[in-house]
Image (cartoon, rainbow, N blue to C red):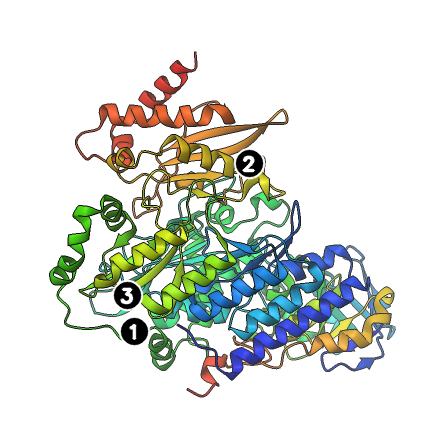
Amino acid sequence: MPKLTNLGIIEHNPWQIAAKDRTFGDELLTGDYWLIHAEQYALNADRLNNVTSVGLWLDTDDNVELYRDAIEQSTVVAVYFPVFSDGRSFSNARLLRERLRFQGELLAIGAFMQDQLFYLRRCGIDSFLIDDADSAKIESMKISLADFSEVYQSSCDQPLPLFRRRAN
Amino acid sequence: MYVYDEYDHKIIGERVAQFRRQTERYLAGEIPDEQFLPIRLQNGLYIQRLAPMLRIAVPYGMLNSRQLRKLAHITRHYDKGYCHVTTRQNIQLNWPQLAEVPDILAELASVEMHAVQTSGNCIRNVTTDQFAGVAPDEIIDPRPYCEIIRQWSTFHPEFAFLPRKFKIAVAGTTADRAAIHFHDIGLQLLVNDAGETGFRVLVGGGLGRTPVIGSVIREFLPEKDILTYLEAILRIYNLHGRRDNKFKARIKILVKAMGAETFAAKVEEEWSHLRDGAAQLTEAEILKNKRFFTEPDYNRGLDDTNEMAHINRFRADNPEFANWLGHNTHAHKIPGYRAVTLSLKLTGVAPGDLTDTQLETIADLADTYAFGEIRTTHNQNVVLADVPVATLYELWQALKTAGFATPNVGTLTDIICCPGGDFCSLANAKSIPIAEAIQREFDDLDYLYDLGPIELNISGCMNACGHHHIGHIGILGVDKKGQEFYQVQLGGSSGYNAALGKVLGPAFGSDDMPRVIRTIIDVFVSVREPDEAFLDVFNRIGIEPFKETVYAKAH
């Protein structure tokens, strides 16, 4: 599952994504890279302090505030798309960046589609985990990442709305 | 009118290039149908019964003559030579080819038009009153605010995959000709006691399957806070709107489920984090947008009575002109001017349709008589907003020749009608033939005028694009065992005293409809006091007398 960054660079993807209901114990400390659901991360928070090989993922209906402490501790957070039409993770991504001030790596995982990449980037996503089935489209995805060079409203990538930037 | 700067041109140009590439990828089999669906919807493209349909945005209903001429060219070159004005002030083409849509969008962009977000689960066209800027009862011109909101909502990255579509309307008068009580967000412009401009904010109104009147969640929001406040509302909706059931996914369902007060509190809480951010409007930005909507070069110092005197001499000899003057022209805040409605409700023509030559004729008339500007209305007509009174007779003659002078504006036959079963794959029944049959039934103008103002709205299905819930008389097409039937409602209203129509009773066959409407009108006429309006009579006597008489005659 390749990892595409928001600057259009393909990076090695070390992450395995754990199912929501999978429980963990000491296997989290073997150095294997895991993204585990926020609930699980919270339960294991103590042992995961400074463990950079384990990150957390948030489901589309998760309330980011509920996992504030876990998010603060983790260096990597992923937001999940069960289907591309479920746009809740766009809001969660922005809340992670702008409300919780998450400064680690923010990933998009799941069924988002190529033509959402630009918006996801705007909402604070750093990297996208691409389905193997779609890996042939990665060059095309790089183009989609740069669909627009200018934007009207403020977001994570551009804190000033256009009306504050354009000449009068 | 708003004029694009280099930024607007660039952004829209990039959108056209994006959709061109997306269309190429789709036609090459690289995008599955279900993924192309939201992409094409957010570029206005529906796949419909007979052909793709392209919904072109007309931001808050404003067009200029150059744009009309381009639309004429587009209908000729890419379509079957006509287009349709919708109940949200947009314009639809019924016959474009998918592969040519990027070219159409490029042509639209050349005259500062687009089809951005006119469909899909995103923020749609912001609509307002067709008399914005000229109405004598206007408190504040809503158009600058519509433009500000339009830009904020365009390609908003967080709100392109909402639970469902999202519609915003702004009213600058208390008469509310923008139906703000029936939108997802309705904004009422007002000035508070301290002289500050702001908005009363309503949320959760809507028509369709579950019609609801919107709830006030904030009595006064200072104008500078509008964007941050809207962002808070949309975020609450995006996160908490239902996604399990398409028919329960609008914000009206969420507001009802939470209760308006709880919803308002949630919005306030979210907004508390946003209100002092960079998205807060500056005075400079508000002023800048107001400057795009300044008054045209009016001839000041005209005396209204004098100007009317010039044309009044034509009234006596010409009852048709007198009728037209009385029904199709409207008061204007500047003495010596009138707003003129071009009726697109000629019997035998689908309500709201315009041919390419008609578009060009309107463009020419706008240039000659109305500073080159036109508005679309949510009752599917078109308005020339700034016509000198002294030119009205001349204009009327030109309109008559062009077929726009049917003097029925505001009357029973000024029908709002969706495209219906003739065009739309969602429809349960045809709507256009019903409109025509009713217009033919009521072809006596004097009688029509005596009836006074009546709003008759027809929808071909529960999606209510014809706004049947808020017609004084509403007609809803239903499918009963594969046959087309029509349910009648009475007493709806979209004005300040917003109300939803009440169902009369069991549905009728299409052949019965003229008789049914005739009977309803007969009841009204038999009990009305002199000059009493239909809606007032209904509110006075209730539905029973209508029900009894209509269904008694059926047996």
Question: Residue A113, how many percent across, how many down?
Answer: 73, 64
Marks 3 and 2, Cα distance to the nearest angstrom? Answer: 40 Å
Q: Chain of mark 1?
A: B
Q: Secondary structure at mark 2?
A: loop
| CA distance separating discs 3 and 1 | 17 Å
Q: Residue B296 bears which disc, if any?
A: 1
Please report contact status of discs 2 and 1: CB closer than 8 Å, yes or no: no
Query: What is the residue that sits farthest to the bottom in this orientation?
Result: A167
Residue occupied by mark 3: B140
Crowding near the residue tagged with mark 3, few <14, some 14–19, many ≥20 C-alpha atoms within 10 Å: many
Q: Which element type, helix, strand or loop, lies under badge 1? A: loop
Q: Which residue is mark 2?
A: B430
Q: Chain of mark 3?
A: B
The x, y position of residue B162, in whole percent, is: 59, 58
User: Mark 1, residues whose alpha carbon is within 10 Å: few (<14), some, or many (≥20)?
Assistant: few
Q: Residue at x 23, y 24 (%)?
A: B527
The answer to whether the residue labelled 3 contacts the one labelled 2, judged by CB atoms less than 8 Å apart, is: no
On screen, residue B398 versus residue B30, left or right, reads: left
Going from N to C along the chain, the mark reached first, 3 or 2, is 3
Name the one closer to the observer, B228 or B197.
Answer: B197
Q: Quadrant of residue B101?
A: bottom right
Instruction: Reply above or below: B520 against B38.
Output: above
In what element is the residue under mark 3?
Answer: loop
Q: Earlier in the sequence, mark 2 or mark 1?
A: 1
Looking at the picture, tell me which residue is in the foreground, B211 or B13: B13
Residue shown at 75% from the left, 61% from the top: A111
Say the numbered circle drawn on residue B55: none
- Rendered location of residue B326, percent (x, y): 23, 48
